[in-house]
Image: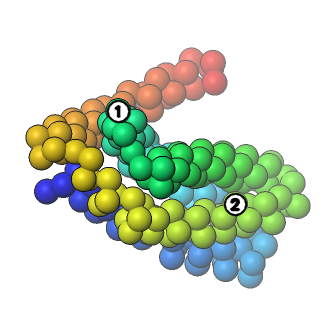
């Protein structure tokens, strides 16, 4: 198994979020309401799985190792674009959460913002994933020896093993802050 095979498998999971987002956007157009729980789950999924877990392996392992190689200009440019796209996804996710908060705090005009940011994410991820899957991941594996690829794959597995503990350690810390009234 190539290290990027794991990333491509994760893409199939990320792609599954797009149809529910599109259905929720259609429902919001019909009802003029925001389902805050849906937005919270979407934000959590994007932050935890798509960004921290998936982009974490891309940026923290694959891109780090690629930065040590003498990349073609095309691959170097694509890697820069992908990093910028990750930043865009993070910013859009923050904006979505903020718009949702403003809506539930009594600002109905922000419904259009919630829809816009959800639409932006639903349109962004398929294009971003296609670029990585078809134009970047497999071609850049040629920069690595089989041993380097195996080391990278093991680092991906180690990264994933630590992730669940990081997430729920932060969750408990947040619960403790709320319980102490310091939130």
**Secondary structure at numbered mark 1:** loop
On screen, residue 164 above or below 17: above
Say left or right for 96 vs 156.
right
Which residue: 75% across, 52% down? 99
Q: Is residue 65 visible?
A: yes
Which residue: 37% across, 65% down? 133
Q: Name the quadrant of the N terminus.
A: bottom left
- Expressed as whole percent of the image width and height from the top left, the position of residue 144 reads 22, 45
Give the number of the disc on residue 117.
Answer: 2
- Expressed as whole percent of the image width and height from the top left, the position of residue 40 reads 57, 52
**Local crowd size for mark 1, using a 10 Å CA cut-off: few (<14), some (14–19), many (≥20):** few
Q: Toward the viewer: 113 or 148?
A: 148
Q: Name the quadrant of the C terminus.
A: top right
On screen, residue 117 above or below 72: below
Give the number of the disc on residue 68.
Answer: 1
On screen, residue 169 above or below 120: above
Which residue: 39% across, 59% down? 136
Q: In the picture, residue 6 is in which quadrant?
A: bottom left
Say left or right for 43 vs 55.
right
Given contact means CB atoms under 8 Å apart, are the residues at marks 2 and 1 in contact? Answer: no
Which residue: 51% across, 62% down? 128
Give the number of the disc on residue 87.
Answer: none
Q: In the picture, residue 164 is in which quadrant?
A: top left
């Amino acid at each position: 198994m190539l290290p990027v095979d794991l990333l491509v498998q994760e893409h199939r999971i990320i792609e599954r979020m797009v149809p529910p987002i599109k259905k929720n956007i259609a429902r919001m157009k019909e009802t003029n309401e925001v389902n805050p729980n849906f937005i919270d789950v979407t934000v959590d999924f994007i932050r935890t799985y798509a960004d921290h877990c998936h982009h974490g392996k891309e940026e923290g392992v694959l891109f780090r190792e690629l930065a040590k190689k003498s990349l073609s200009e095309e691959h170097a440019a694509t890697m820069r674009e992908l990093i910028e796209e990750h930043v865009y996804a993070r910013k859009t996710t923050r904006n979505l959460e903020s718009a949702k908060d403003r809506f539930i705090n009594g600002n109905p005009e922000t419904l259009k913002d919630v829809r816009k940011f959800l639409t932006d994410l639903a349109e962004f991820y398929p294009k971003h994933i296609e670029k990585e899957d078809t134009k970047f991941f497999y071609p850049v594996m040629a920069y690595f020896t089989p041993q380097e690829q195996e080391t990278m794959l093991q680092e991906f597995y180690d990264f994933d093993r630590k992730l669940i503990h990081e997430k729920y350690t932060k969750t408990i810390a947040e619960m403790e802050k709320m319980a102490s009234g310091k939130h």
